[in-house]
Amino acid sequence: MIDNVLKTIDARRGQLLGGLEPFLRIPSVSAKPEHAVDVGNCARWLARELEASGLSASVVPTRGHPIVVARTPQDPARRTVLLYGHYDVQPVEPLEQWVSPPFEPAVRDGAVYARGSADDKGQIWAHIEAIRAWGADLPVNLVCVFEGEEEIGSDNLENFLESNAQQLKADIAVISDTNQFARGLPAITYGLRGLVYMEVTVSGPSHDLHSGMYGGAVPNPANVLVELLASLHDRDGRVNLPGFYDDVVPLTQSERDAYASLPFDEAKFMEELGIAALVGEKGYTTLERKWARPTCDINGLTSGYQGTGAKTIIPAKASAKVSMRLVPNQDPRKIASAFMQAMRDRAPKGVTLDFANHGASAGIIVPMDSRATQLAASAIRTGFNREPVFMREGGSIPVVGHIKRVLGIDTLLVGFGLPDDRVHSPNEKFDLDALYFGARTAAALYHELAKL
């Protein structure tokens, strides 16, 4: 049966983009209130497409943006697969850097350029094409959960999972929101880093002051903030927070050997990024730093006058947004507490510090030798006609932890994107080959997971 399904996808290869394009035209930017109607329209559009694919679908309201839920008829004799994805997309700014309008899909050099093409609409569409190719013969019970708030922290998803845990029971979850290692080198992602995202605000005088009249006599919140931020790393690139590395699980030698065997070209990597040198924690390779070591990065800085020309002030406030990527076994609450305590201990007298926590999730590892992982590897061999590699990714997908905690099941991370897809940046793209081979792999994955 799988051979016929793959032949159906092969025959439709030239039509796959035509189904995806209307999805990409909907500006479902969850972060912007002015796009709330578009997000809702996108949810309803997706539900209709799932209905047309033979599933029963509904748009479930939340306190924020809706969640689309779809399912096949449930047969107790079959294994059940929970498919998660997100239909919301990142903001498009800076708009002037886009070669073509972000919500008008354009094909160039074998890829479709549009916001959300790789993250995550194109990858969702690969699964929908696979579902359509199977038709009524889909060999597993399928439950789809597509949310509209992933790009803004999934604030309502955990509550949704808890409230609907019985209806979402499954044997395994599948997410396609990750990458191949490189073009033509498909991968199973077996590890993700977690995240703690903090904002620190330093307050000094009650109002902005003239820097000539008061400079040198009062604490400058901007000066204080940059000193605090400069203290976050030591000379060896390690994060300088007490207890930060206490719970870090070291990489095994077999993992380090496997990463070293991958065809990673540092010179090409730097060229693509437009940088002349790489930095990071001493004693680790670039892939090890990106995938499996914890980090701390400043994501935004705000203080003082930033308009045209000069305005000589001592600003009353200064703030920074700081993200810490965590590896498995690090406790996000412990790390957030260590960050706040270190900033308070290092701050001078005369200023006050306030903190906001914008998100926390733990890192995860999926066993490489599990039955489900090996079945996924077989599906990739069928779909791509290539042997997959096993890799980690440095990003975070908090829903993986939610699914494990609430539903008690592991998640397979089988993604089809490429490292150069410019996710979250102008000129995001999704290769048409990735769409095609992704649809084949998704079809094969349902065939393989029926054997669980």
Image (tube, rainbow, N blue to C red):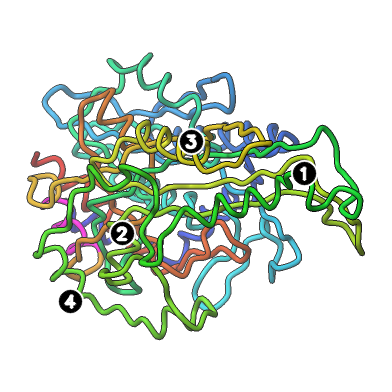
Q: Which residue is mark 4?
A: 261
Q: Nearer the viewer, residue 114 or 345?
A: 345
- Asked if residue 277 is positioned above or below residue 319 in the image, the reply reads below
Q: Is residue 251 found left or right of 431 in the rendered image?
A: left
In the image, which is nearer the foreground, mark 3 or mark 2?
3
Looking at the rendered structure, the secondary structure element under dot 1 is loop
What residue sits right under mark 1 in the picture?
Answer: 218
**In front: label 2 or label 1:** 1
Give SS at disc 2: helix
Q: Which residue is mark 3?
A: 340
Are the residues at dot 3 and dot 2 in contact (C-beta closer than 8 Å)? no
Q: Secondary structure at mark 3?
A: helix
Q: CA distance from mark 3 to mark 2?
A: 25 Å
Q: Residue at x 30, y 30 (%)?
A: 403
Q: Amino acid at mark 4?
A: Ser
In terms of sequence position, does the residue under pointer 3 or pointer 4 come before the other?
Answer: 4
First reached walking from the N terminus: tag 3 or tag 2? 2
* Residue contact at pointers 4 and 1, CB within 8 angstroms: no
Q: Quadrant of residue 360?
A: top left
Whether residue 48 is visible here, answered yes or no, is no
Q: Is residue 93 magenta?
A: no
Label 4 vs label 1: CA separation? 56 Å
Q: Which residues are magenta?
A: 374-383
